[in-house]
Image: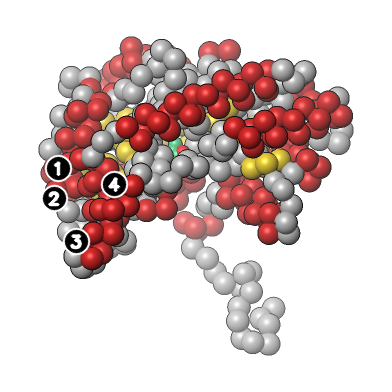
């Protein structure tokens, strides 16, 4: 039924099959529910956010202000200014041991856009894309949008959610076109050990499958895990698509800046796609990104040290709650505890747990189902120690009462 205004209802609008195949990001749904409570003045312990709680470093903000003052506010080349592409390649070589040239780099409107562009440039209907679970929520939807079929590879908490080459090989069929791996992982914090990652790459090379390596959290690793790029492995370039982002490393989520490093013909095709969609990423954000790539890395070390402290506290706090088990994440800024021992008739799954946790204790977390890993909750520790302690108190009370 069309309302009297003549404006069509959602049902009356014929949306494309393409867009009907995907859902809204579940993490956004949780954030919205938490925001609604906050807007009513409720004190929410918010562990939903997938973004640093630190401000963008000063030298990066200055560079954007200077770009504005110098009127660098016009279109730039579609793949980004040459200086930035060169600086990304130099930074990546310096920090992560790769060897890319500017022609093998395209700058996009965030890492999500980089993945979207790469997948849409390569995946045809019927193509299979292997995605290890727990996975970042957008991977399957981006693949579906492109017409591809996500093939989910289960990893286990007992094995710290690490993607294993042997398990991957078993899932590869003649239709497999790509494997998407993020290390460190959102939501599990898993880090693929370099020798295992090299085996994953070798499987992809042997089978003629692209490896899309999402390095969004590359610089947030703990303990023995160190920043590592599979692009540092000699001979990796032909099968590899590196996706990087300024969002987490430099606390720049709102600037929307990410990049792809890949063989030149793929970069050229992504640039073509970008030329018919977003065009260049925002010019002043690019100049900010240039300062990030050329500037000091001490702000990253400062953030990492703080994340490491919080990680200790939250892992210990969660493990102290009866019926909650929790692997120690090796990277990123999330913990992914298993809370399935608390399932009962009132809360039979993790989505129900997350809902009740928000309603009763005003604690915002994302249910594991959203990441293809039922029984878990994703808890972001990109929040202050004080909020972590408060949240732990509330979760102890909640699970204590629920038992
Ligand atoms: N990849 C992973 C694993 C992420 O967690 C995110 C953001 O949460 C992204 C990519 C995309 O980040 P952005 O688009 O802000 O660069």
Q: Look at mark 1 in the image and give the residue it sits on.
A: 86
Please say if the residues under marks 1 and 2 sit with CB atoms less than 8 Å apart.
Answer: yes
* Image side of residue 3 versus residue 311, left or right: right
Residue 190 appears anywhere in the view: no
Position of 14 relative to 99 (above/below) = below
Q: Residues within 10 Å of mark 2 (few under 14, many from 20)?
A: some
Asked whether 313 or 235 is in front, the reply is 313
Separation of residues labelled 2 and 3 (CA atoms)? 9 Å
Using the rendered view, name the quadrant where residue 386 is placed: top right
Between discs 3 and 1, the one toward the N terminus: 3
Q: Look at mark 4 in the image and give the residue it sits on.
A: 59
Q: Position of residue 16 (x, y in %)?
A: 49, 63
Q: Residues within 10 Å of mark 1 (few under 14, many from 20)?
A: some
Query: Dividing the image into four equal quarters, which quarter contains ligand 1?
Result: top left
Position of 252 relative to 309 (above/below) = below
Q: Residues within 10 Å of mark 4 (few under 14, many from 20)?
A: some
Identified at 28% across, 59% down, the residue is 65
Q: Residues within 10 Å of mark 3 (few under 14, many from 20)?
A: some
């Amino acid at each position: 039924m069309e309302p009297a205004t003549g404006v069509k209802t959602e049902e009356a609008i014929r949306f494309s099959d393409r867009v009907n195949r995907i859902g809204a990001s579940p993490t956004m749904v949780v954030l919205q529910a938490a925001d609604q409570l906050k807007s009513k003045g409720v004190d929410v312990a918010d562990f939903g956010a997938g973004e640093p709680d630190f401000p963008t470093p000063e030298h990066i903000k200055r560079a954007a202000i200077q770009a504005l003052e110098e009127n660098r506010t016009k279109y730039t080349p579609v793949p980004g200014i040459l200086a930035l592409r060169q600086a990304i390649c130099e930074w990546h070589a310096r920090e992560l041991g790769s060897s890319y040239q500017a022609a093998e780099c395209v700058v996009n409107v965030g890492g999500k856009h980089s993945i979207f562009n790469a997948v849409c440039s390569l995946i045809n209907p019927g193509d299979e894309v292997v995605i290890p679970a727990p996975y970042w929520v957008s991977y399957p939807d981006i693949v579906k949008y492109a017409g591809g079929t996500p093939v989910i590879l289960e990893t286990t908490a007992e094995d710290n959610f690490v993607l294993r080459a042997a398990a991957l090989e078993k899932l590869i069929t003649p239709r497999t076109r790509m494997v998407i791996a993020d290390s460190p992982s959102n939501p599990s914090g898993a880090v693929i050990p370099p020798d295992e990652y090299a085996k994953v790459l070798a499987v992809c090379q042997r089978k003629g499958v692209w490896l899309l390596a999402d390095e969004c959290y590359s610089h947030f690793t703990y303990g023995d895990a160190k920043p590592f790029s599979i692009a540092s492995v000699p001979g990796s370039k032909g099968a590899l698509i590196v996706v990087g982002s300024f969002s987490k490393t430099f606390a720049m989520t709102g600037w929307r800046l990410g990049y792809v490093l890949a063989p030149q013909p793929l970069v050229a095709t992504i640039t073509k796609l970008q030329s018919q969609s977003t065009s260049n990423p925002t010019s002043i954000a690019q100049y900010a990104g240039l300062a990030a790539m050329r500037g000091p890395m001490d702000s990253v070390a400062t953030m990492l040290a703080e994340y490491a402290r919080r990680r200790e506290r939250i892992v210990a706090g969660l493990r102290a709650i009866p019926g909650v088990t929790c692997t120690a994440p090796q990277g990123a800024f999330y913990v992914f505890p298993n809370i399935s021992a608390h399932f009962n008739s009132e809360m039979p799954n993790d989505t129900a747990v997350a809902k009740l946790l928000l309603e009763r204790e005003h604690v915002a977390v994302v249910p594991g189902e959203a990441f293809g890993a039922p029984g878990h909750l994703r808890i972001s520790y990109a929040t202050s120690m004080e909020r972590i302690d408060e949240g732990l108190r509330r979760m102890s009370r909640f699970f204590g009462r629920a038992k």
